[in-house]
């Protein structure tokens, strides 16, 4: 237990104080523990599949202008095609939606690296090697020299997000294993587990290399010192949890009517803000994620959902609501993990700095679903 | 054969009444069984019906009270057969759609009596017998609204009773006048000849019939009982009220107005067509202003019944065929819309368009009900491919040659139908689900099934309208020809 040195005057002081005590933004109840652990288990399975596919696309489908079978992970056969057409599959489109959102919002070392001369030089080498025997694409490259470079930037994000999710999938799946072994019994323990996973992998290098004609081309070499936490995790949280992109049901797409802010800093469409009610509608990207998670829900979670008024008729909305709870736990872990000083510091100045850090984050959550998930 | 259709619900009503007190599910099952047998019997009759023969078929005649000239005389033709089928079908649907309620034995007994009354009215070939059945349906309906209705059920039921009783007075007076003044010895419909009566007398009698049945249809300005009755009535009762009972009014106009007084009819026809325009436009305008979904559908009914008056006024073979088509079409579509509004109300507790939004929500809303509602409003607005289009097209095509201006004005009503129903769908079903209704209970397939059956019929008859016109065309052609002959005779 941490002693709170100075009480917060923040409008959401209750949540600031929870974080000051090392607790989570989500209320600690037995049902919340079950919901969060089990939804993160199904999320872990899904992002494991997403990450494999993103890495496959980055390594094998880069600079392919018509990657028809990019979701097949290199295994194309009639049975898989039929299952795909019947929609018996993981919605990898959602992973791409997240990838594009990260690309759009940028941030972190990965984004900065893509504008460096080093990247452009490496990209040119890859492009030359890839298109040298393709008369048409070579012509396109001559006419629009930035086009394929930009395609390669997209591939970098495919790889970056794939590597990020690779780590997170293991964190979430191991959380469930520990829960089953009786080691996880409270929401703060969930946050601790996630925080420990983030810290453990914080300096894991992010690299990206492709093979063309048996020759390996490094697009992000280890020497660039891009790392898991600073260059993928934090930009991911910023882009997906906070900013996101508007989609039907939340706001109108009519940017000409200034219904969407031009200021990306004012984007508040991320997972922590999204309205769960439109989930299930066509054109709502999170629908795809909820559909995917639906297949891997543990039995206990199904039981909780069946007890609701509509049973599992509104399963995807219920999954989304639970998922938002879990995302507040992940956010709690990220906020606590990024504290400038240890939580239990006795230095008044450091405590003050920590408070400023926490209040800054909680201020951003004022318009989020924080109060709704804690009802 | 025909008496079976009256006796079955009457026997059913007695059986339900004799059930032990406290039985909850059995009355519904027994009522459904009796009404299903009635429906099957009507289908058997339809298959044995000769659509080319314009005379009354399956006639049954039993002398009753000679002194009064009243006989138990039943028969069907192409005008009454489709309405009998509609009545049998909607009764089954209304019973199936009824949820658990208090005093179930009495409720189902009244539903069966209502069914018997309406069936008898459609079968009666004697003016007084028709009137008896016409009055018989009044009491059960009054009680059904008055006991199982909404908060203002007493007011609505009493208003309905007063209006319909007044309607009955006008009808009875006209029937008595018709028989006595024409010198007939009985109330038999067959052989009643009014051509010898002076035109002024005929017009006077027709006015009585027009007011009497105009209240029942209802036509503006006799319509005010209908929105109140619909708003307060439970969903199954609204289904029967809009689907079948209003048709007694239009059926009466054709059977006793156009058929018995063709000379006077042709004389007042331009006024009737104008009256139809007023009813159509007034009904549609009022519907646009409504916030209550049920009231909107009720005003829509007033507007759509105006089309039948227009077509009846024109009295061409095509337009009279259009009246029957429109009666069936309106019966199916309005029943569907009332069923759907009923499901919305049951699940959300509201019919207020200021409260309801986003019911199309795929997870927490009612997307299947919303889809059926879209189909229903499209049918009502006359979208091709559905029975609403066919019936309105025949009405307008048949009436245009006689009353071009009135027909064009009525066509504006079709446009207005699209306006108010799109407003309804847009407000209630699109957008974000209202905060007030985010935790709706489940919608089960049993809630959807009756509406799906009606929706299928609306589409099937829209694609294959000949399955409906087949039964009725000869009769309606004869009905219009009588009018033409009378017009020539007058000249």
Image (cartoon, rainbow, N blue to C red):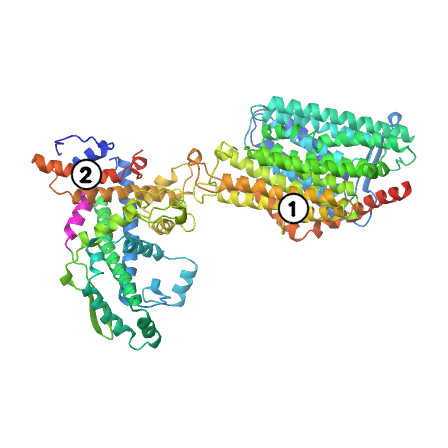
Would you say B37 lies left or right of B122 here? left
Residue tagged by mark 2?
Answer: A358
Q: Position of residue A79 (x, y in %)?
A: 40, 65
Main SS type for the magenta part? helix
Gap between marks 2 and 1, in whole Å? 63 Å
Query: Outermost residue, left direction?
Result: A347
Q: Secondary structure at mark 1?
A: helix
The part of the chain drawn in magenta is: A188-203
Foreground of the two, A102 or B238: A102
Q: Position of residue B477 (x, y in %)?
A: 80, 47
User: Which chain's residue wears label 2?
Assistant: A
Mark 2 or 1, closer to the camera: 2
Image quarter (top left, top right, bottom left or bottom right) of the C terminus of chain A: top left
Q: Position of residue B122 (x, y in %)?
A: 75, 37
Picture layout, residue B16 above or below residue A278 = above
Residue B111 magenta? no
Tag 2 near tag 1, CB within 8 Å: no
Image quarter (top left, top right, bottom left or bottom right) of the N terminus of chain A: top left
Residue tagged by mark 1?
Answer: B388
For disc 1, the neighbor class at 10 Å (few under 14, some 14 to 19, many from 20) is many
Q: Is residue B470 visible?
A: yes
Q: Position of residue A153 (x, y in %)?
A: 26, 62
């Amino acid at each position: 237990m941490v002693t709170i040195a100075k009480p917060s005057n923040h409008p959401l002081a209750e949540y600031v104080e929870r974080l000051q005590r090392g607790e989570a933004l989500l209320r600690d109840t037995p049902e919340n523990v079950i919901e969060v652990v089990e939804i993160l288990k199904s999320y872990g399975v899904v992002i494991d599949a997403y990450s494999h596919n993103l890495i496959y696309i980055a390594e094998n489908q880069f600079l392919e202008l018509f990657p028809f079978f990019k979701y097949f992970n290199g295994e194309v056969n009639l049975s898989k095609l039929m299952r795909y057409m019947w929609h018996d599959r993981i919605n990898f489109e959602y992973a791409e939606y997240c990838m594009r959102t990260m690309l759009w919002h940028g941030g972190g070392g990965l984004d900065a690296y893509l504008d460096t001369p080093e990247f452009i030089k490496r990209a040119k080498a890859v492009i030359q090697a890839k298109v040298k025997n393709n008369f048409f694409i070579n012509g396109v490259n001559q006419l629009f020299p930035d086009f394929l470079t930009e395609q390669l930037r997209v591939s970098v994000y495919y790889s970056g997000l794939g590597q990020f999710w690779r780590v997170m999938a293991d964190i979430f799946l191991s959380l469930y294993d520990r829960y089953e072994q009786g080691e996880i019994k409270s929401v703060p323990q969930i946050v601790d587990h996630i925080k420990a996973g983030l810290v453990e992998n914080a300096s894991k290098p992010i690299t990206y290399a492709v093979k063309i004609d048996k020759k390996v081309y490094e697009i992000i070499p280890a020497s660039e010192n891009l790392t898991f936490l600073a260059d993928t995790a934090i930009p991911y949280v910023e882009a997906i949890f906070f900013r996101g992109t508007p989609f039907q049901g939340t706001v109108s797409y009519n940017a000409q009517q200034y219904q969407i802010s031009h200021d990306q800093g004012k984007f508040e469409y991320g997972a922590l803000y999204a309205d769960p009610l439109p989930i299930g509608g066509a054109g709502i990207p999170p629908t795809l994620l909820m559909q995917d998670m639906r297949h891997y829900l543990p039995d206990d979670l199904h039981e909780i959902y069946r007890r609701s008024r509509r049973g599992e008729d509104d399963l995807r909305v219920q999954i989304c609501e639970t998922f938002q709870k879990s995302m507040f736990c992940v956010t709690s872990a990220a906020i606590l993990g990024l504290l400038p000083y240890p939580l239990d510091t006795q230095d008044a100045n450091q405590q003050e700095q920590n408070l400023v850090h926490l209040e800054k984050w909680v201020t951003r959550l004022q318009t989020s679903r924080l109060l709704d998930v804690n009802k | 054969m025909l008496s079976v259709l009256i006796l079955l619900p009457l026997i059913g009503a007695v059986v339900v009444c004799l059930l032990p007190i406290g039985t909850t599910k059995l009355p519904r099952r027994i009522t459904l069984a009796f009404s299903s047998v009635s429906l099957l019997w009507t289908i058997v009759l339809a298959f044995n019906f000769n659509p080319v023969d314009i005379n009354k078929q399956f006639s049954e005649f039993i002398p009753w009270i000679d002194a009064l000239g009243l006989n138990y005389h039943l028969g069907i033709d192409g005008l009454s057969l489709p309405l009998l089928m509609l009545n049998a079908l909607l009764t089954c649907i209304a019973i199936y759609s009824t949820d658990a309620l208090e005093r179930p034995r009495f409720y189902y007994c009244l539903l069966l009596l209502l069914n018997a009354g309406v069936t008898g009215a459609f079968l009666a070939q004697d003016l007084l017998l028709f009137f008896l059945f016409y009055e018989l349906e009044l009491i059960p309906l009054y009680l059904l609204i008055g006991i199982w209705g909404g908060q203002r059920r007493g007011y609505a039921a009493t208003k309905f009773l007063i209006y319909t009783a007044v309607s009955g007075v006008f009808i009875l007076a006209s029937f008595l006048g018709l028989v006595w003044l024409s010198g007939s010895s009985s109330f038999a419909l067959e052989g009643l000849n009014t051509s010898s009566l002076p035109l002024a007398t005929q017009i006077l009698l027709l006015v009585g019939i027009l007011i009497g049945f105009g209240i029942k249809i209802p036509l503006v300005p006799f319509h005010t009982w209908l929105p109140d009755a619909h708003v307060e009535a439970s969903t199954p009762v609204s289904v029967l009220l809009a689907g079948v009972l209003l048709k007694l009014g239009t059926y009466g106009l054709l059977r006793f107005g156009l058929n018995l007084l063709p000379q006077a009819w042709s004389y007042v026809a331009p006024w009737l067509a104008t009256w139809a325009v007023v009813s159509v436009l007034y009904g549609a305008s009022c519907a646009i202003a409504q916030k209550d979904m049920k009231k909107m559908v009720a005003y829509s009914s007033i507007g759509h019944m105006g089309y039948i008056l227009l077509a009846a006024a024109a009295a061409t073979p095509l337009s009279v065929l259009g009246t029957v088509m429109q009666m069936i079409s309106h019966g199916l579509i309005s029943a569907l819309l009332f069923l759907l509004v009923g499901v919305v109300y049951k699940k959300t507790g509201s019919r207020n368009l200021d409260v309801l939004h986003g019911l199309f929500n795929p997870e927490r809303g009612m997307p299947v009900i919303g889809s059926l509602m879209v189909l229903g409003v499209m049918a009502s607005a006359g979208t091709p491919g559905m029975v609403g289009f066919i019936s309105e097209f025949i009405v307008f095509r048949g009436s245009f040659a006689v009353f071009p201006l009135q027909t064009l004005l009525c066509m504006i009503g079709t446009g207005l139908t699209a306006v108010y129903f799109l407003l309804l769908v847009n407000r209630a079903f699109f957008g974000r689900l209202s905060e007030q209704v985010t935790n709706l209970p489940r919608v089960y397939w049993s809630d959807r099934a009756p509406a799906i059956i009606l929706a299928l019929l609306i589409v099937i008859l829209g694609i294959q309208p000949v399955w409906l016109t087949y039964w009725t065309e000869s009769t309606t052609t004869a009905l219009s020809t009588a009018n033409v002959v009378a017009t020539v005779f007058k000249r």
